[in-house]
Amino acid sequence: MVTSRVHITPHMHWDREWYFTTEESRILLVNNMEEIMQRLENDPAYKYYVLDGQTAVLEDYFAIKPENKERVKALVQAGKLIVGPWYSQTDTMQVSGESIVRNMLYGIRDCLALGEPMKIGYLPDSFSMSSQLPMIYNGFGIDRAMFWRGCSERHGTNKTEFIWQSNDGSEVTAQVLPLGYAIGKYLPQDEKGLRDRLDKYFPVLEAPSVTKDILLPNGHDQMPIQEDIFEVMDKLREIYPDREFVMSRYEEVFERIEAMRDQLDTIKGEFNDGKYMRVHRTISSTRMDIKLIHAEVENKIVNILEPLASIAWTLGFEYHHGLIEKMWKESMKNHAHDSIGCCCSDKVHAEILNRYILADDMATNLINFYKRKIVDHMPTREGCDKLAMFNLSPYAREEVINTTITLRANAFNLFDDNGNAIEYFIQDQRIIDPGKIDRQIVHYGNYDPFIEYDIQFRQEVPAMGYTTLHIEPHTKGKTKVVVQNEYVLENEFYRINVNNNGTLTIFDKETQHTYDQALRIEDGSDDGDEYDYSPSRQEWLLYSDEFEAKTDIQHQGFQSVANIELRMAIPANLQEREERTGQNGSLDVQCQVVLKQGSRRIEVRMELDNQADDHRVRVLIPTPFVSETVVADNQFGLITRPTNDPAMAVWEQEGWKEAPVPVYQLMNFAALENNAGGMALMTNGLREFEIIARQGNQERDTFALTLLRGIGTLGKEELLLRPGRPSGIKIPTPDSQTRGKLVCEFALFGYEGDHISANIMAEARDNVTPIQCYNKIPYNAMKLNVGKQDKPLTYSLFSKGKRGAVLSVLKKAEDEQGLVLRVYNPAEAGELKDEVSFNLPVSSWQQVSMDEKPLEPAPTTDTEFGTLKPCQAKSYLVKF
C-alpha cells in the first residue's frame, strides 16, 4: 500500500536582491539559466523546471543574453520551462490592490510573448496572504493558489489543501507548503542524509494532507540545478518503498486535489498567523523612508496619472502606455517581499530607494506633461495667464485649494470664465530668478524678476475633469482679509484646542464626541531587526507631553494652521535605554495641523528629525470608543480584525514562531466607531497601526500609528516576540536606524453613522488624491509645439455619486481603443448597485476581467455596474 505520492518539482526561488544586490544575483542567473536550459533541451526525462513564477527574472536575463530569447521561448512553448504569472514575487499586505493587479497583468503579458503562463497564484515566500487574493486570481482566470506563510488551524482547517474564498465568493483551490518551498533543496544521495531530513518531514507533510499527494520542491534561493536528482530519486524509492516518487509540475498536484474537492474545507480571510512559520507582522514600519515613497508612487500613478492620462486621451492626446509600464515595472521590482519589506542590506536599500526616486520622477513629469498639454490647447485670453484645477475623483469636489502661481507682477486678479472675481488669500510670496523659469529670458538680457505667490482659495471642480481660472497681472484682485482671533482651530465640524503639552483636544460638533490628548507621541525601545519589532526586556517608554512644547496658531484666508514644536530627549541607543543611564539622543518634532473651511479632514504633517538608535516612534490618537474590533481597508475592500489577539496569552506555551501581536496593515485608513459615529485615521503611506489601551488595561480605545522604527541589524536571534534563530542573516544595517529627517502625513476624520454610510473609503481615496493645479504662463524652459487651441476650459468625463461603489482606477485599455474603469464595493457585508454617467456618447460598455478580456453579457450602452457583492471589484471597458 502506498502511503503517499511524493511530487518532486525542480525550481528556483529567485530573490533578485536581499543581502546581495541584483547585479550579484544576475551573474548567478546567467550561469544557472544555461545549465537549466541545457538540461531541459537534452534530457527528455528531466521534464519540468519552475522559474519562480516571475518574469522579472527573465527580464534580467534577457538584458544580458538577448540571443537566448528563442531558446527560452521554445522551452516555454514545449511546457518544460514554466514561467509566470507574476512580474515579481509580490508582497500582498503592503502593496495596493492595483499594484497586485498590474503585477500579474504585466507578468502574464510578458509570459504570452513566450508561451503560456503558469496559471497558479504562486507566492512561496511572501510573508502573509491578503484575504482578497482569490478574487484577484479569479480576475485573471486563475483558480489555484500555492503559498507557505500565514496559515494555522485558527482559520478553520488543519489541512494543507482547502478551498479559499474572498468575501465576494470568489474561490481558489489552495495548496499550502507547510514546511516551505526549499525542503527538497540539495537532496543527498546517501540513505542517512535522506533519512535525517525526510523522516522528520514526511509525517508533517502527510498528516494534514487530504490527498496524500505531498510536495518536495527541489530548489532553493539562487540554487543551481541539482544534476543528480534522478539518482537521488532512485535512492528514495529504495529506502521508502511505501511511497511513490515522481517528477511533477505543480498543476499535476492540483488536478489530484481538485478530484477530491468534495472533501476540502472552505475558509475565508487573510493568512497572517505566525504559529508555524514567521509572517513578520511588524515589517510594515521598517525603513519608513522607503515605505513612504512606495505609497507616494503607488498613489501618484493610480489615483492621479492614469485618470489624468485617460482624460487627456478623450481630448485627443496620446496615452503613453510605454512610459507608464516602465514606471510600474521600476516600482514592482521593489514589490518583492524582501524588497518592500526592507529586510535587506543597506546597499540593496539604496538601490530600492533609487528605483522609487526614478519612478516618482517619471510619474511627476508625465503628470505635469499631461496638465500642460491640456492647458496649452485651451483658447487664450489676451493678457492673462491660466490656473487649471484637475479633480481625479468621480464626483465634484468643492475644497480649499493651496497652490503656487508665478508671474511678473506685484498684484493680480483671479477670475472665472464668466468674469466673476475669485476671492483668494496670499499665504507667502518670494522673488524668483528669471533663469529658473526660462534661461532664454536671461540669455536675451531680460533680468526682471518673477514672483511666486502661495495662494489659497475655495473652488468647486467638476467630477473626473477640470476647470480653469484666469490670472490678470497688474490688477488688484479680491483678496481676503484675515483677523487673528481665538486661539483655536474651528470650522463647521470641529472645535480644536491646542494644549500646552503639544496635544489636541478635538470636539466633533455633529457627533458630540471629544478626542482628548490627540497627537501624543510615544517613544519606546526596539530590540528587533528589519523583519520584526520587538521591545526590550527592560522597556522604558517616553512621551512627548513630558517635554516642553511651543505652539502657535495662524488663521489664514480659508484655513487655520497650528504649529507645534518640541524636542524629546530620548536614550541614544538600546544600551542607554535598558540601563537608564541617560537621554543623549533626541527626536525633534515639527507638527503642522491644518483645518480647512468646509472640510471634515484634520490634516496633520509631522516632520521628525531622529537622532537616536534602536527605538520605535508612534503617534497616539485616543478615542471614546472601547472596541474589540477595528476596521481597515485592504485591497479592494475592508477587513475587520480583533483589537486584541487572544493567542497572545498562550503563544509561548503553544510554541508559536512569533507572537501574534495585534499590529496590522492598512492601505489608506483604519476606523473605530460606536452607534453615533466614529473616527477614521487616514494615512499617506503610514501603513502600520495598533489599537492600544490608553489606561494600560484591556480597554483598547487608542490608535497607535507607527511613524518610524530604528534598528541596526538585518536579522537578530532570540527576540522577545520572536524566539530562536535570526530571520535572514545577522549583518549590520546602520541605515535602517532611519536617522535624520522624515515627513509623515495623515488625517483625522470624524463622522456620523458608520464607516459605510459615511463613505469613508471614498473619503480616504480623496485624501491621497488632492486637487491638481497647473499654472500656465508664457514662459517655459522646455518648449512644446502647440496645435489648435480648442480644448474646453471646463470638462468632466463622467460622474457618479460619492455613495456606493468606490473608484479603483481609470486607465486606457492595454489593447483596445477604450478606457478601463474599475470599481469595488468596500463593504464586508451587503450587495450594492451603482452606475456612472458619461458626458461623452458611449458606443460600448462591457464588463471585462482584470486582464481586460471581455466577459458576458455582450456590450451595451447602459453604463451600470450591476450587482457588486461584498468587497467585489468589477472592471468595465467603455468606448466612445
Image (spheres, rainbow, N blue to C red):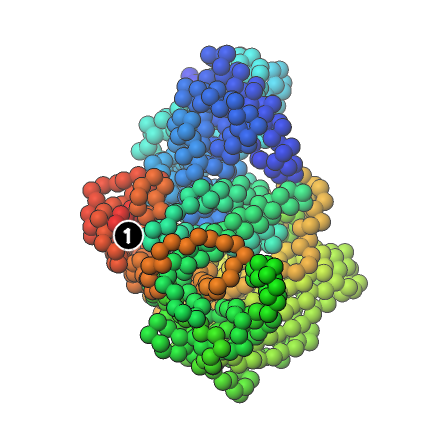
In the rendered image of this protein, does residue 194 appear above or below residue 59? above
Q: Is residue 695 visible?
A: no
Q: Position of residue 110 (x, y in %)?
A: 43, 33
Residue at coordinates 34% horizontally, 59% vertically from top-left? 791
Residue under circle 1?
868
Residue at coordinates 66% horizontally, 60% vertically from top-left? 741
99 and 520: which one is in front? 99
Query: Residue 615 sits in which quadrant?
Result: bottom right
Q: Is residue 472 visible?
A: yes
589 and 385: which one is in front? 385
* 137 left or right, relative to 332: left
Q: Position of residue 579 (x, y in %)?
A: 78, 60
Secondary structure category for the residue under label 1: strand
356 and 425: which one is in front? 425
Query: Residue 27 sits in which quadrant?
Result: top right
Residue at coordinates 29% horizontally, 51% vertically from top-left? 869
Q: Quadrant of the N terminus?
A: top left
* 292 left or right, relative to 152: right
* 800 left or right, relative to 149: left
Q: Position of residue 129 (x, y in %)?
A: 46, 44
Q: Position of residue 103 (x, y in %)?
A: 45, 41
Dot 1 alpha-carbon crowd within 10 angstroms: few under 14, some 14 to 19, many 20 or more: many
Mark 1: amino acid: Leu
Residue at coordinates 60% horizontally, 72% vertically from top-left? 430
Query: Residue 654 sits in which quadrant?
Result: top right
